[in-house]
Image: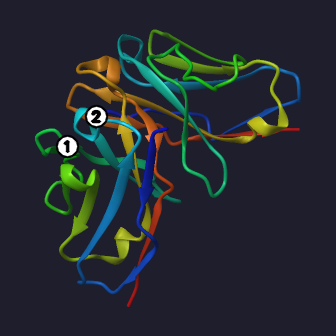
Amino acid sequence: EVQLVQSGAEVKKPGESLKISCKASGYNFGYYWIGWLRQTPGKGLEWMGIIYPGDSDPRYNPSFDGRVTISADKSSTTAYLQWDSLQASDTAIYFCARRGPGSGSVGYYFHYWGQGTLVTVSS
Amino acid sequence: SYELTQPPSVSVSPGQTASIACSGDELGQKYASWYQQKPGQSPVLVIYQTTKRPSGIPERFSGSNSGNTATLTISGTQTVDEADYYCQAYDSSAVYVFGPGTKVTVL
């Protein structure tokens, strides 16, 4: 059974750093892209970026490029999303999700999702 | 940037058919996906590659795509289908784009 288990809720102050995780199990971690998505009441679901754990090749939504870093560790089958300096506008629920299989457009959807991590940034 | 539009809400009576439209430039030439999200839960994939249902998704969920509009159809809608539904496509600029979501109310 494919499972993505995310780390727990976080409360941080503006300017602080943060790294949240997504532990994958039930499949070959290195063979499927894992994406990170943000959900806020005002902006709905937004794709932030995606990584191929096989070679740790990340791709970013231009809207988030330079604001976050996506990484993956094959040895622990865990993907990460990190910020160096949080802002209040980063308050949201963050989901990791496994992309569909294969290369090309046939796999451009998110099949399995983590339970979400609530990040609250407030002074 | 590429955008997808959806109606904010759709109301349907139990047992009737609900149709949710998702519009975007040349969407008919892309694969569309649909996700169901209930309050406090993660999204669930209900349609991928425009017309396919993942294992475990009831047959009453179906998808189609023509021109600039993709459509999610729920036939014989049940009260358990009350949720937010998001469409999603992949843009040629290498971005996964989501629609704003449609709240389906079954009453």
Q: Determine the residue positioned at 33% across, 87% down.
A: A13
Asked if B40 appears above or below B99 in the picture, the reply is below
Quadrant where the N terminus of chain B is found in the figure: top left
Q: Which mark is residue A32?
A: 2
Tell me the subunit letter for badge 1.
A
Question: In the image, residue A54 lies at what x, y percent?
Answer: 16, 38
Could you say whether the residue bearing mark 1 is in a helix, strand or loop? Answer: loop
Q: Determine the residue positioned at 35% across, 69% down.
A: A90
Q: Which mark is residue A53?
A: 1
Q: Is residue B24 left or right of residue A18?
A: right
* Cβ–Cβ under 8 Å for marks 1 and 2: yes
Question: In the image, residue A2 lies at what x, y percent?
Answer: 45, 39
Residue A73 visible, this orientation? no
Q: Amino acid at mark 2?
A: Tyr
Question: In the image, residue B22 lies at what x, y percent?
Answer: 52, 26
Tell me the subunit letter for badge 2.
A
Question: In the image, residue B92 lies at what x, y percent?
Answer: 22, 25
Which residue lies most toward the bottom here? A123
Q: Amino acid at mark 1?
A: Pro
Colour scheme used in the picture?
A: rainbow
Quadrant where the C terminus of chain B is found in the figure: top right
Q: Earlier in the sequence, mark 1 or mark 2?
A: 2
Residue B71 visible, this orientation? yes
Q: Nearer the viewer, residue B38 or B100?
A: B38
Asked if A118 appears above or below B52 in the picture, the reply is below
Could you say whether the residue bearing mark 2 is in a helix, strand or loop? Answer: loop
Q: Determine the residue positioned at 31% across, 44% down.
A: A35
Callout 1 environment at 10 Å: few (<14), some (14 to 19), or many (20+)?
Answer: many
Q: Say which quarter of the image contains residue A59.
A: top left
